[in-house]
Image (spheres, grey):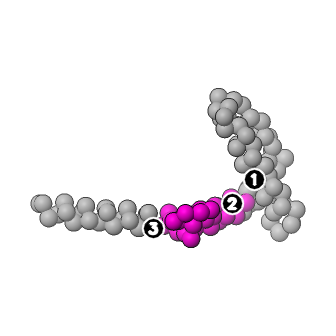
Amino acid sequence: MERVDVSILGRDYSLVCPPEQKESLTAAVRHVEQRTSAIRDAGKVNGNERIAVMAAIQIAAELLSTRAPDGPLSNIALGDFKRKIDDMNALLDQVQGLAGKAHN
C-alpha cells in the first residue's frame, strides 16, 4: 500500500491505496478539489461541509448520467441501468417469496 497526501479545501488528508491505483486516486482528488473550489468560489454555499456535500451530489449526478461510449448499452445512463437492475432484483425477491409460500 502506498500513502498519498492530498489537500481539499485547505485541509490535508492522508490516503492509502495500492501503488497501481495511485494515479487514478490523485485524478479523483483533483476532480473533487476542482468541484469544491468552484462551489466555494461561486460564494453561494458557506462552510466546507456544505461545499463537500454539494460537490458530492454534483459528482454523483454526473456519474449516474454517464453513458457507455459504444455498444448495446450506449443509450442507457448508468443511473437508469442501476435502477433497472434494482427493479429486477426486487422482482426476483418477490418471485422467490411467492415460491417459498407455495411450498409451505
Q: Quadrant of the C terminus?
A: bottom left
Q: Give, as a three-letter code, the residue at label 3.
A: Lys
Q: 48 or 82: nearer the eye?
A: 82
Q: x%, y% of residue 28?
A: 72, 48
Q: Residues within 10 Å of mark 1 (few under 14, many from 20)?
A: some
Tell me whether circle 2 and circle 1 mark residues in contact (CB < 8 Å): yes
Q: Which image quadrant is residue 78 in?
A: bottom right
Q: x%, y% of residue 59?
A: 69, 60
Q: Which mark is residue 69?
A: none
Q: Residue furthest bottom?
A: 75
Residue at x 84%, y 47% (from the top left corner) = 10
Can you see residue 104?
Answer: yes
Q: x%, y% of residue 15?
A: 70, 37
| SS at badge 3 | helix
Q: Which mark is residue 84?
A: 3
| SS at badge 2 | helix
Q: Which mark is residue 32?
A: 1
| SS at badge 1 | helix
- Between marks 1 and 3 in the image, the one whose residue lies nearer the viewer: 3
Residue, disc 2: 59
- Between marks 3 and 2 in the image, the one whose residue lies nearer the viewer: 3
Q: Give, as a three-letter code, the residue at label 1.
A: Val
Which segment did they paint magenta? 55-84
Q: Which image quadrant is residue 36 in?
A: bottom right
Determine the CA span between mark 3 and mark 2. 21 Å
Residue at x 70%, y 64% (from the top left corner) = 58
Q: x%, y% of residue 101?
A: 17, 63
Q: Quadrant of the N terminus?
A: top right
